[in-house]
Amino acid sequence: INFGGLKINSNGCNLGVPGNVEATLATVRAAEGLPLHLTHIQCHSYGTEGDRHFSSGAPRIHELLNKNPNISIDVGQVMFGQTCTASGDSMRQFAISKNASPKKSVIMDIECDAGCGVVPMRYRDKSYVNALQWCIGLETFLLMEDPWRIFLTTDHPYGAPFSPYPHLIRLLMDKSFRDDMLQKINPDAAANSIVGSLTREYSLDEIAIMTRAGPARSLGLKNIGHLGAGACADITVYRDDANREAMFAKPELVFKNGELVVRDGKVVKVVNGATHVARPAYDKSIEKPLKDYFERYHTMRMQNFAVSDDEIEDNGRGALIVEPVRARVT
């Protein structure tokens, strides 16, 4: 199907299921050159080799990804520690609730129209599965040749909250530090991963591309993700430090839309964010059959389902932006 050059965002099949690497490879091949973004690919890179029938499929996936420039990915890196998983897939959340830590969860069905599940999760470095998930994410980062097509994520909060990003960046930039951390995880997981043999260290330029310029270009945001004249004045300034975790954890200055909001790692001004919206053209005649569908099968009417501009902008929660007009770099 030709989507007019738009990039399709795919969640992939068999999330978290050992053996799903085959479905991921099939998805890449099925794109046949069309632009496709694969989300939290770490969760879709599992093989079934070994005594535990759980292994890394990242090398196989990246052998194919590096030959297919139409595909971009984000990682969904697992980081050790406490987090929670949150999803509209209530049945999947129910399935993993047996692994909740602590043993609590909220699974709800909303009048058969939607679902939601929140399950607390603690990833442990001595757990074979958790440690191999950590390794698979790092393999994914280190094997991807093109930093413009891979985006740094933990699939917040699924793999971890976003707060460990500085630690993750250090893992990618510092092989000796990465090797030290590898010695602390489950030894079987470390032995079944190629992370220790990968010598790549990300440069500052590659980190900037992967976390700023690449995602902006992928989304078609021409005035975001660079410091050229006319770009939106969203700027972060860091003091150079050999310890990249310390460097990225505490920016010297952060400007949001041209306003100084952080100095020496402390928030000095709170500003409202923005809501980016797209308004694709569509055939208005579809509204009648959709309205009939809502009346027949849903518990709310179609006109109550849509979110209006006023609701988005209510009480300053976020200025509605179609084509951003903000402070510019001059």
Image: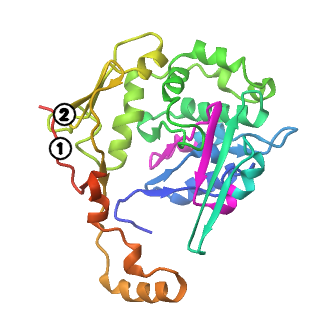
**Residue sitting nearer the eye, 171 or 120:** 120
Give the percent coordinates (x, y) of residue 203.
43, 21
Q: Is residue 81 magenta?
A: yes
CA–CA distance in space, label 2 to label 1: 8 Å
Residue beneath the point at 46% across and 16% down: 246
Give the percent coordinates (x, y) of residue 59.
64, 37
| Colouring mode (rainbow / by chain / secondary structure / one colour) | rainbow
Label 2 is placed on what type of residue?
Gly
Asked where in the image residue 237 lies, by quadrant, the reply is: top left
User: Which residue is outermost to the front?
Assistant: 315
Q: Secondary structure at mark 1?
A: loop
Q: Which disc number belongs to residue 326?
A: 1
> Eyeballing the image, is 290 above or below 146?
below
Asked where in the image residue 147 lies, by quadrant, the reply is: top left
Q: Which disc number belongs to residue 258?
A: 2
Give the mark, 2 or 1, whose residue is nearer the N terminus. 2
Packing grade of label 2 (10 A; few <14, some 14-19, many >=20) is: some
Q: Secondary structure at mark 2?
A: loop
**Residue sitting nearer the eye, 180 or 262:** 262
Label 1 is placed on what type of residue?
Arg
User: Which residue is outermost to the left?
Assistant: 330
Q: Quadrant of the C terminus?
A: top left
> Eyeballing the image, is 167 above or below 258?
above
Q: Quadrant of the N terminus?
A: bottom left
Residue beneath the point at 72% across and 35% down: 130
Residue beneath the point at 58% across and 19% down: 199
> Eyeballing the image, is 122 above or below 20?
above
| In contact (CB < 8 Å): disc 2 and disc 1 | yes
Q: Which disc number belongs to residue 174?
A: none
Give the percent coordinates (x, y) of residue 79.
61, 32
The magenta stretch is 64-93
Residue beneath the point at 27% across and 32% down: 269
